[in-house]
Amino acid sequence: MTLPHSRNTALDAMRGFTIAAMILVNYPGTWEHVFPPLLHAEWHGITPTDIIFPFFLFIVGVSIALAYSKRLNQGTAKSILYQKILVRTLKLFAVGVVLNLIPDFDFGDIRWAGVLQRIAIVFLACAFLFLNSNWKTQAWIGAAILILYWLAMTMIPTPTVGRVMLEPGENLAAWVDSLYLPGRKWQGTWDPEGILSTFPAIATGITGLLAGKMFLSSHAADKKANYLMALGLLSLVVGYLWSLDFPVNKNLWSSSFVMLTSGLAALVLGAVYFVVDILGHRKGTAPGIIFGANAIAVYVLADLLSLIFYRMNFNGQPLNQAFVRALIQTGIQPEMASLLYALLFVGINFIPAYLLYKSRIFIKL
């Protein structure tokens, strides 16, 4: 498959493969049988699945830097950009809330937090920050967010227990959610996409802004890749050292988690940029580019399709369970059967993504 090349093929492909990975880990054949790397860490620690969401927020930051720099250079007024940013934020947030309501639409049990809602907030904050500050200010703000969050989480006692806690439901972020986050929480009294942890998530987006600044610099292409990977490695080291006091934790979106995942994202983007855009080895990037062209739309579509594939009855049981059971009966390991279903579901979502791309239809949520 041959696709037209862009100046940022690596970024386009990385965005798409990240969305595909989101779908893969969100929709296994059965949650009873999943390979451990395809599950989130129960609390402290990190798995490959844990890096997917921060990778996407990092990419959001990079994309903001590239897209809005271009529009500013074209003479687009900031007032027009502000309007577009606000509209897109509201659309993303609203779609996230609607997905939480489907299929029952129980407005008395509405969940206001969620993945798309967090993407919307990070996009809003980072877009406004990019339009009104330089990269040094952005770096200082990102650092300040992470340091203040670290100090708050490790030095302010959780009021309900009277001491500093980082345990599930017994930490400062959970306490803030229990008081100020309206509606249903994913974990009963707290939410992994809750109020306080959204601030370090914004910092993840800021690291993407800084990576985008690197792409916009006047350095030679190979130096951009080298600098990006070097900074990624430095971020990894900082994240590891920070984790000795503030553990890596996706649910808390800890400061060490931000540095570690942003470092990994920078390393991956730098390496892919070098191989794909500098050396020109674009073979294998087509699926990522196709998924990435309508990334959020495909993510939403997967959520909608799951209502069919996880509820459609086949011989008295949901289609996913029937599929997994049939494979297990042939002697396939249960975890592998569950993974094969997830891969099939990713492939099913690729079909509309391909048709949209082929028709040059790009849905901007």
Image (spheres, rainbow, N blue to C red):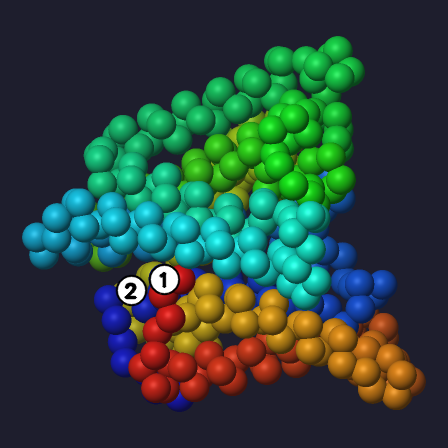
Amino acid carrying label 2: it is: Asn
- How would you rate the neighbour count of disc 1 (Cα within 10 Å): few for under 14, some for 14-19, many for 20 or more? many
Q: Position of residue 340 (x, y in %)?
A: 72, 78
Q: Position of residue 160 (x, y in %)?
A: 75, 17
Q: Is residue 272 left or right of residue 305?
A: left
Q: Residue furthest left?
A: 75
Q: Position of residue 16 (x, y in %)?
A: 45, 68
Q: Is residue 111 left or right of residue 55?
A: right
Q: Which residue appears at 56% of the width and 53% of the height? A: 97
Q: Which residue appears at 64% of the width and 47% of the height? A: 111
Q: Secondary structure at mark 1?
A: helix
Q: Is residue 359 left or right of residue 268?
A: left
Q: Secondary structure at mark 2?
A: loop
Quadrant housing the C terminus: bottom left
Q: Residue furthest top?
A: 162
Number of numbered discs present? 2
Front residue (pair 102, 334): 102
Amino acid carrying label 1: it is: Leu
Q: Which residue appears at 17% of the width and 56% of the height? A: 70
Give the number of the disc on residue 11: 1
What is the distance, in whole Å, between disc 2 and disc 1 at their CAs?
A: 5 Å
Q: Is residue 45 visible?
A: no
Quadrant housing the N terminus: bottom left
Discs 2, 1 touching: Cβ within 8 Å? yes
